[in-house]
Image (cartoon, rainbow, N blue to C red):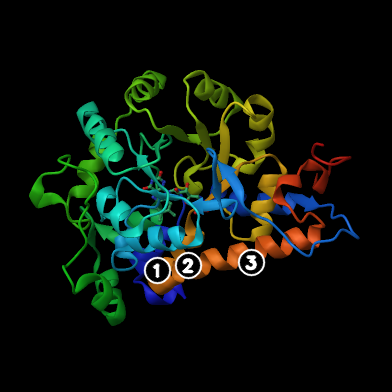
Amino acid sequence: MARRRVPNFCFEYVEGGAEDEATLRRNRDVFGEFAFVPRTLVDVTSRNQSVSLFGQASAAPFMIGPTGFSGLLAREGDVAMASAAAAAGIPFVLTNVSTTSMEDVARRAGGRIWQQVYMYRTRDFIEKLARRAHHAGIEALVVTTDSAIYGKREWDMRNYVGHQQLNWRNKIDVLRHPRWIADVLLPNGFPKFANLGDLLPPDKTSVRGAAASILGQNLDPSLSWRDIAWLRDLWRGKLLIKGVMSPEDAALAVAHGVDGIVLSNHGGRQLDGALSTMDVLPDVIAEVKGRAAVMLDGGFRRGTDILKAVALGADAVLLGRATTYGLAAGGQAGAARAIEILRSEVDRALGLLGCPDIGGLDGKFLRKLGSAGNVAS
Ligand SMILES: Cc1cc2nc3c(=O)[nH]c(=O)nc-3n(C[C@H](O)[C@H](O)[C@H](O)COP(=O)(O)O)c2cc1C
């Protein structure tokens, strides 16, 4: 439905990965390498899938992760997704490149809002952003560390000529989507970046113009653990790092005082050929479990995918495309529907697994195919 309802250039932006998309494929294939070992004759009349994240309950073992340009998929897409998350009782991570500001999202949607941060060259920008986040009641900052250099996304490259100028094929395709034009373009033209403070010149905030390349040039390739130490001193709320893929970095994150890590290969959009987060999760859990919250994303499309990660020891999963497809298909109602599908699949699978309380789900319920026994006990 999402593919039909939004223009090709929007859908391919969501759907695509980097280069040969080997990591994008790996993110889905990996779930086939884990299989459940269900228990039977267990009373599963009442089932619980809520988990505790930083001392507060989340109604499901997943949340909505950060995705940029959501305002291109549906009108005020960030508010729509945040509202769907708040109504479902799960956290929402707002992208730095949103088209609604964190203040407006927090005020209009309510719920638990975490703010994703790209580290731009000016540290001044990060200081101001942290101050704004504090005043807006943002619970956590989530620093994305895998994007200091932009991945090579060839579908995107083919859809444009120059700075975000669509080629003719895509311009014509836009005209074939009058409903999208009415929803997204007619109110105020192309949406504008609204969460970047004064990083962009006032006349260059449209997602269509030069903003994307200005932002790209401002990403800081010198980003290092020193910056995390600096941010840890500055920000008293919860601090998470998104983009960890190795046990060594997970240990370093804990040593730098972060509260949580998000294992991520950016949905296969950055380094192609990287492992899936499910490949590295067991080693990361062995390294840091109990010292920091461990979350992950990449390829989660089914309730059973989410439960496989929880059985391996993850605290929660972040959704990327699963909820953006919902948003593109039906705005807030569509995002809510995506959440509901996953909630009901998790609920059903907990019953079928003979594990009515998600707190009891561990490695005894899972086997890695090709290995002799369960993944852990
Ligand atoms: C359309 C789109 C936009 C994204 N924008 C951001 C972003 O602004 N910041 C960020 O940290 N990650 C971003 N990501 C990565 C997601 O947060 C997440 O890591 C990834 O989508 C997970 O994989 P999945 O889509 O297979 O669930 C984006 C992903 C997609 C698909």
Could you say whether the residue bearing mark 1 is in a helix, strand or loop? helix
Q: Which is nearer the N-term, disc 3 or disc 2?
A: 2
Near-viewer residue (343 or 37): 343
Q: Residue under circle 2? A: 336
Could you say whether the residue bearing mark 3 is in a helix, strand or loop? helix
Q: CA distance from mark 3 to mark 1?
A: 18 Å
> In the image, 367: left or right of 138?
right
- Where residue 96 sits, quadrant-wise, is top left
Q: CA distance from mark 3 to mark 2?
A: 12 Å
Residue 62 position in % (x across, y down): 56, 52
Residue 157 position in % (x across, y down): 33, 54
Residue 344, numbered circle: 3
**Amino acid type shown at disc 2:** Ala
Q: What count of labels does the image hold? A: 3
**Amino acid type shown at disc 3:** Ser
> In the image, 55: left or right of 231?
right
Q: Residue under circle 1? A: 332
- Residue that lies at the very extreme toward the left in this rendered image: 203
Is residue 252 positioned above or below 218 on the image? above
Residue 366 position in % (x across, y down): 79, 47
Is residue 124 positioned above or below 12 on the image? above
**Amino acid type shown at disc 1:** Gln
Residue 229 position in % (x across, y down): 39, 19
> In this orientation, does residue 328 appear?
no
Q: CA distance from mark 1 to mark 2?
A: 6 Å
> In the image, 353: left or right of 246?
right
Q: Are marks 1 and 2 in contact (CB under 8 Å)?
A: yes
Residue drawn at (29%, 34%) of the image? 130
Residue drawn at (24%, 47%) of the image? 195
